[in-house]
Amino acid sequence: MTATTADAPPPDLRLPKRRGVELLLLIGAVLISVYGYAAVGLAKNGAVPPDVAGYGAGLGLLALLAHLAVRFRAPYADPLLLPIAVLLNGLGLVLIYRLDLETPKDQAAPTQLIWSTLGVALFIAVVVLLRDHRVLQRYAYLSVATALVLMIVPIFFPAVNGAKIWIRVGGFSFQPGEFAKILLAVFFAAYLAANRNALAYTGRRIWRLQLPTGRVLGPIVAIWLLSVGVLVLERDLGTSLLFFGLFVIMLYVATGRTGWIAVGLLLAAVGAFVVGSFEPHVHSRVQDWLDPFASIDAGQGPGQLAQSLFAFAAGGMLGAGLGLGHSILIGFAAKSDFILATAGEELGLTGLTAVFLLYALLVARGYRAGLALRDPFGRLLAIGLASILALQVFVIAGGVMGLIPLTGMAMPFLAQGGSSVVTNWIIVALLIRVSDQARRPQPGQVETGIIAPIARDER
Amino acid sequence: MIRYIRRAAALLLVLLVALLLNAARIQVLDADSLDNNPANRRLTIARYDQPRGNILVGGRSVTGSKNTGEQLKYERTYRNGPLYAPVTGYASQTYGTTLIENAEDSVLSGTDSMLAPFPLWNEITRSQQPGGNVVTTVKDSMQRAAYEGLGGRRGAVAAVEPSTGKILALVSTPSYDPGRLSGTGPSVTDAWERLNASKSLPMLNRAIRQTYPPGSTFKVVTAAAALDAEVVTDPDADTDTPSPYVLPGTSTTLPNEARGCEEASLAEAIRVSCNTVMADLGVRVGLKGMVDAVQKFGFNDTGLRIPSGVAKSNFDTEMTDDQLALSSIGQFDTTATPLQMAMVASAVANGGDLMRPYLVDRTTTRGGTTVHQKGSRTYHRAMNPRTAMQLRDMMVDVVENGTGSNAAIDGVTVGGKTGTAQHGIDNSGRPYAWFISWAQAPGSAQPAVAVAVVVEDAAANRADISGGGSAAPIARSVMAAALGG
């Protein structure tokens, strides 16, 4: 070893920002969406839809604006996050437009496009205005209070399709529970980042489980009560499962205590069993899951879940092709909760796998940002937000495919639903922000990889 | 914390794998059973997603398809539905299919693998071919002649070409318009209920699905059995039969409606239709001989298809002699479809060779390429050629000098046999008028047509209902149409 390495300092290390890659992927995402839009028109009407150029330009403009916001305000952000979100959103619009053709009186795609625009606008706002995610840590308790209010308000509004999760003002309706997800993730991340040592290393040991002390047991019981409360009062099994799953994952990541997981799962199992047995709305969902074809045997024709399974089966390996399936037979909620059935039927197992892998990639990039970050709050926030996406996909995809009991929940970006699409854009914006922080070169990092000359002298 | 993040990621990976495995289970492993679940509308939607192939009579299609723009897109239409209903049947989105629509459904709906350009093409591309066409053997002029001849009375006509077995006419009246059953919805269910509730049974295909006591027309079969069994060697020789005839083993006497039947010859018995002589001959042939003989004509065959199933024409196989005597003159439990009796006439006309009757000549792709050609096949040798020659002469005699004079056509060799079947308890039911006949043009080596006509005329009084009066003129016009090119 000579001193040459020390004598000639390396040129300025320029970490790749990968913004060009992002732009290319965005172009790909927009083109795929436009192609899907054209394919639907060709299959259904034998002609490319007349507004295909406008649709492509609109989507392209949104993608470009989002890209510019990222380029100037979060230049080191993960280049995969935005293109995946645009592709999923574009694909969702194609699927909704495709289903609109079957229901001339109920056009959902234009509304969805407006919500998507609003979502991208909020995405840009978050990326531009939120310069450092650690600011959020200060608003932890404000977040949880707002979240609670948002979740309680719909109880005072009439139930829609059996679930009290909607606020309707005039013709305008949204699900406040969707926004509560982000706020809760922020609160969990802040609370756990602050208390994780107390949670992890105090408490009694019973048999092989490290149980927490009573003082810190409070929050977990509160969250458990909250999710069961949501379940009972709003009859929304999906959101309840999501909150609980989110909390358990974040708690585990923060403390590493399997005991917590055991307690959490036990409580969840008890809660789910009790509610599943006694709450009629949830009970019927469980029955439907156990035997999707019961209504056929009873001579009442196939139920929604059976129709959904028929749609997936009709897709087979390669799918019927966009516009050529009959997933509209599902009827109610075909464009929202059951949108995945249309993807399954028309894109086949191949296309469905691709969609799942897109979600997996999105979640994985979130986790990757979490791994790379240094501050515990940022880590937990990244893991929490990514886990929200993952759990949502699992709960609703598993539900419509008969893997778990069906619970009403929107497939992120794909499904019709304004609150959901806006929320997911904010989640992606926050992931962009934390990934930018994670990949940004740290001050004082320049010494990395150079053996200090002093060490050699001592030897 | 990094270790725990990795473990949480591993958990999510497990969830992803679970989703993917479950997707593969539904979309690949369980796909077939889900696709074929009767509650799954997709097969039905695909079935009606393209125009159904057509059924052709005399080179012209008697069916069509119209685009309704509904979920089940194409509905069946029929040109002159009531006329051809006994041939085509119906193809309903609500009530399924019958007759040719049913028997050739795979060709008409385009699912038949033979329609595909290559083997397994449909299976691999998951597509179906345009519906193919079905070319029938029916001759339009004959079908119309028979339909108009029946004139709305309850009855049926079946006509076959003796040398090939081609069914040239198949009519049942009163008929119905199968087009009214094509679609879905209340108008269809109403029509269905009304048709099913109607006392005149318009949806019953009397020509092949209804059996009637054949009455005196069955004497042709008994005569063939007697000649083949050599119970009678000379048709013109006197038979030793008293009139009235006492049924064997009973004290019941069997009368004749005709005169001059005492010890009448076989030829005379056929010409004037003597019950006594034929009943006695049937008993002398014996149960086994009679059963063997009638089965060669197609009686007791439950598997005859044209390609739709034909109702079994019955001749009991276990009887006492008095029952055999009655059965031999087409009474007791003896029943026959009009098609069966047309086959009897055809066997006589064709020198004893009975060809298997068939209604579908060939099936083609939409473009006209033949997919499947049905050739004519021998069904049975029904009687010796010599017997057939003798019976031909006897049947010609019936038309020229006997009860069947209404069927005579100038310059054409026509053979026939009348029948009047009484039925019900103590013959209280309405009698059926029968006429079976065949015709051969002068100078032609082969007979052109064999016809069976049955008229169940509720309105007429018993004296008017006779094969010669009601049924023979219909048979005559059908035969004339057959000979008219």
Image (cartoon, coloured by chain):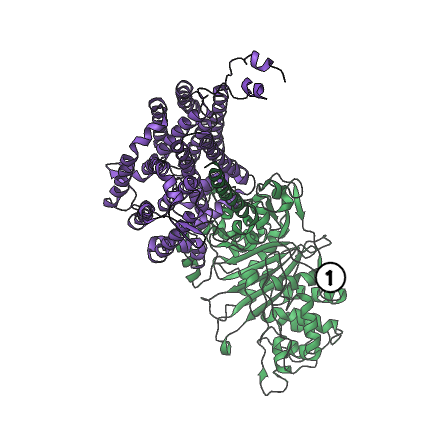
Chain colours: A purple, B green
Q: Is residue B304 left or right of residue A234?
A: right
Image position of B408 with respect to A410: above or below: below
Q: Is residue B295 left or right of residue A375?
A: right
Q: Quadrant of residue A52?
A: top left
Quadrant for the N terminus of chain B, please. Answer: top left
Chain of the residue on which disc 1 is drawn: B
Q: Could you tell me residue A134's position as x and y percent?
A: 35, 28
How packed mark 1 is, by other alpha carbons closer than 10 Å (few <14, some 14-19, many 20 or more), is: many
Q: Could you tell me residue A76's position as x and y percent?
A: 45, 22
**Residue most extreme to the top:** A8
Answer yes or no: is residue B56 visible: no
Foreground pick, A391 / A254: A254
Image position of A423 with respect to B373: above or below: above
Total label count? 1
Foreground pick, B58 / A108: A108
Residue at 54% over, 40% down? A349
Foreground pick, A155 / A224: A224
Label 1: which residue? B351
Foreground pick, B285 / A296: A296
User: Callout 1, which amino acid?
Assistant: Gly
Image position of B442 with respect to B266: above or below: above
Q: Could you tell me residue A15's position as x and y percent?
A: 50, 19
Q: Could you tell me residue A282's position as x and y percent?
A: 36, 53
In what element is the residue under mark 1?
loop
Q: Is residue B434 left or right of residue A388?
A: right
Answer yes or no: is residue A415 visible: yes
**Residue most extreme to the front:** A458
